[in-house]
Image (cartoon, rainbow, N blue to C red):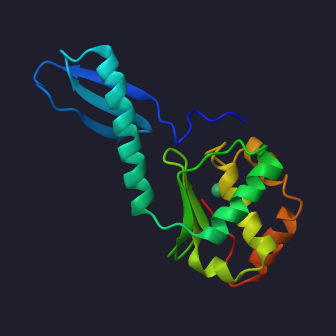
Amino acid sequence: MQQDSNPLDPPVRVIPSRRRRRTVAARLRSGVLELMVPASMPLAERAHWAEVMRRRLLNRAHRSVPSDERLAERAQRLNKRYFDGRLRWLSIGFAEMQHQWGSCTFTEGTIRIAKRAASLPDWVLDYLLMHELAHLVHSDHATGFHDLEDMYPLSERARGYLMALDRPPVME
Ligand SMILES: [Zn+2]
């Protein structure tokens, strides 16, 4: 159950540039924090800037996405009980979704649960969360994924519950 990289701690790639004089720029690309620095910058200073830019990016990401206390609390409880508290994510929150109950952006570590799921019973909501949490480990729906999802003992029942509603349990 290893992740490729912790979304809260992206690997940093330093790219020295001869054209740069003093300024440092950073961007997040496929889960890697790329740091463009002047070629003349000493290593210690590069490391310092890597840390500064990492925090700046994360702060910006946190501000730009909605978070919901109830979801965050339940997800953390599931994380402790079924994943030994090892999972990390950047944000979790309700969002407007037409055709899905939830989604998980594996590379960014953002989990979204459909707003209409807020009225579901807690044990069904927990199933939706388990599904998306399992995606932090497996991006696809292969066998390993279902083993994780089914650690939650009410998964099967929850799938039936969702099936009985108007909408089938579509999730990404
Ligand atoms: Zn899925």
Vertically, is 170 above or below 13? below
Q: Quadrant of residue 70?
A: bottom right
- Which residue is nearer to you in this view: 79 or 1? 79
Q: Residue at x 69, y 70 (%)?
A: 169
Quadrant including the C terminus: bottom right
User: Residue 168, percent across and down?
Assistant: 69, 74
User: Residue 34, percent across and down?
Assistant: 33, 32
Please state if 43 lies on the left or on the right of 80 as rendered.
Answer: left
User: Residue 86, percent across and down?
Assistant: 71, 41
Q: Quadrant of residue 42?
A: top left
- Image quarter where ligand 1 lies: bottom right
Please state if 71 lies on the left or on the right of 144 as rendered.
Answer: left
Residue 170 visible in this rendered orientation of the protein: no
- Which residue is nearer to you in this view: 67 or 152? 67
Number of numbered callouts drawn: 0
Vertically, is 87 above or below 129? above
